[in-house]
Image: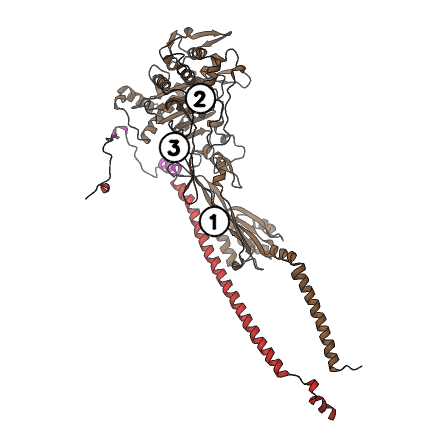
Amino acid sequence: MKYTAKTRAIIACFVLTTCFTGFSARLAQLQIAKHDEYARLAAQKHIAKQPIYARRGRILDAHGEILADNEPLKTVVADGSLIPHPEKVAAAIADLLEIPEAELRETLTTPRKYLVVKAEVPEAVASQIAARMEQKKLKGIYFEQDFRRFYPNGEMLCHVLGCTSREHAGVDGVERSLDEFLRGQEGFRYIERDRTGKELVPYRGQERPARDGCNVRLTVDMGLQSILETELDAAYKQYRPGTAVAILMEPQTGRILAMANRPCFDPNHIVKDDATMKNCAIMNMVEPGSTFKIVTAAAALNDKAVTLDTMINCEGGRFSYAGKVLHDHGHGDHPNLCVADVLVKSSNIGAAKLAMKLGELRFHEYIRSFGFGEKTGIKLPSEISGLIHPPHKWTKISITRIPMGQGVGVTPLQMVCAMAAIANGGKLMMPQIVDTVFDCAGKPIVTFPPQMVRQVVDPATTDLVRSALKDVVSKRGTAVLATVPGFTVAGKTGTAEKSDPHGGYYHDRYVTSFIGFMPVKDPKFVCLVMLDDPKATAENLYGGTIAAPVFARVGERTARYLNMQPDPALLVPETQNLAVRLTKAGH
Amino acid sequence: MPRNNRLRSSPENSFPLKAIVQIVVAAIVAGGAGLTFVQYRNRSITSSGREIRRLEKELADLNNELETLRPRISQLASRTALQARLNDGFIKMVPIKQDRIVQMSLARETPMRTVANVSTQ
């Protein structure tokens, strides 16, 4: 059968048309019907979401000294699909990564496209790895930006600063309480890669820049912190207490100038479940002992139940009440004491009688008014509120024990706030640890101005209490060793028997403390020194002999640091001799 | 022979070779030009991409270097490090004796001023 040329042309056209119609149909199926599916597959293969690293904000002290910063590091990541010869890559970089070559070779023998080979690799090492890979024309190893939180001062101020987790979330301290400001927000960028894994820069997709974390400036002055830590450290080594706390606060504003705890930890090297990470200043509930008498005296004076000169019958140092006997230590020869001397001599019976004049309800109101039994509101996590029982839960002897600081649970910071109220004219201030939060451009976005919680007692009352507390730091009082040459100091000692968890009190273990302020006329700072269970001879186990000298040394150095003007009249030979004696004693 | 001659001269079998060649050549030229343009564009895009990447890397490296040095400076300048160097005797400082300290009291009415602040007019 023979076809004409025309027929052959028609057949050829038909075949071609059929073929191309088939191709067109397939094209339509691929491009239209299955467009989304294939686009997704292509995107999976070539498009990646690249994170843009956001720097965590820095923490600075009151003068801008860096307390927490970031050290850039790299995470080494492998793409197994781009490593045809793992042995070559392993041989090239195993020594730099400090991983045995055989182990690295085994790790890299994988089809996985994302595999973390090693985290926290220093920048310099990462650069060396990149150079060696390029030199040997090897592929499949790349780097992701990471950082490590870094605290230049190590243990200093560790409980306030806290630390972060491996995921860079605040775990403790300011790192946790201000995590929302410090954290920042990572950005991202959609990128397209070619078949060798290289980015096709012109085909970059949507991009959101990273927002760096805000910088935080604290109220803490590292100069004062250093003074406080040095002196507390010396006392900690000398007396080996279970814990030691010292706090320095500006009474007019409530700004925390320094805060130190012992034992302490290095936030650069965190050990999991480390008990030393506890910030005892806000998390330790202690029975304060005689330092609490300032509350009792202020309450009684403010309610006009007594005046400073009112005589209190101290029962010769032995007061029987509700079937229990209350003793005064070493003041049996003072059967009657005026209210001022109740503080100066630290009379337990005198304090009990002052509270009894007020009555349980009124006394409890004052205790709560001074801020005990509630959180102070400081910007630090895990603060406890302490324990103040309501009057209906008091026993019959509570009215004689609470006034001398027994049967109440308070934090050291609450004691400082209460003393600051006495120092500043009766205003209970909220303690401030954070001064300002700055954005990345250095513009303040949040400030924390001084905040008064309430007026606790009248200024006239605080004047009276201050004059009594001034005498505590004299030869007549219990805290002569708290004397600071050239300055008037007011304060109160505390020597509280440690409570036994099995009931009752230990009779040979104490919480010794001293809390004071200076100068009395215009107080620049309040300082608390508290040592829980110090080891010393029985005759020296008092707040006045253990904690008061620490206060004196801190006070002297702080006065010099703050350039406070000494009163020449107070630089009498006697105090000079005292200062010399303290220095010679190695305090 | 006569049949072959008839075939060659038949208008049905005439093949417009010249026209086809012209079209093919034109298509090749146009295609070549197009491909050359695409290749040129690709190359310029790729090279500019490479340049962008290089600059970005340079910038990132500089930034990283800065970020690496900053904590190092913070550490070396930190109070703890300086105290350690002082204790080691690396920094020689002589403590000022108490009797050598003079406390100067400034009169509040005449605040201290630097010379540069004094008006010369």
What residue appears at the point 47 percent right and 55 percent down from the top-left corner?
B57
Residue drawn at x 69%, y 65% as measured from the top left: A25
Q: Position of residue B42 (x, y in %)?
A: 53, 65
Front residue (pair B96, A259): A259
Q: The red chain is which one?
A: B
| Disc on the earlier residue, 1 or 2 | 1
User: What SS does tag 2 mark?
Assistant: loop
Q: Give how far across and how far down residue B77 sits, in percent.
A: 38, 41
Q: Specify whether residue A470 is painted magenta.
A: no
Residue B1 visible? The answer is: no
Q: Nearer the viewer, mark 3 or mark 2?
A: 2
Residue drawn at point x = 47 percent, y = 58 percent: B54
Please state the horizontal and vertical placement of residue A133, each as a whole percent of the image.
Answer: 52, 56
Q: Is residue B89 magenta?
A: yes
Structural distance between the alpha carbons of marks 1 and 2? 53 Å
Residue extent of the magenta highlight: B78-107
Q: What's the distance in space between the residues labelled 3 and 1, CA to CA?
A: 32 Å
**Looking at the picture, how far across and down is residue B7, in whole percent?**
72, 88
Mark 3 and mark 2, same subunit?
yes
To which quarter of the image does residue A463 belong? top left
Chain of the residue under label 3: A
Task: Check disc 3: other Cα within 10 Å, few if <14, some if 14-19, many if 20+.
Answer: some
What amino acid type should be assigned to the residue bearing mark 2?
A: Phe
Tell me if residue A156 comes above or below residue A305 in the rendering.
below
Q: Name the residue under label 3.
A: A226
Chain A as rendered: colour = brown
- Same chain for marks 3 and 1? yes
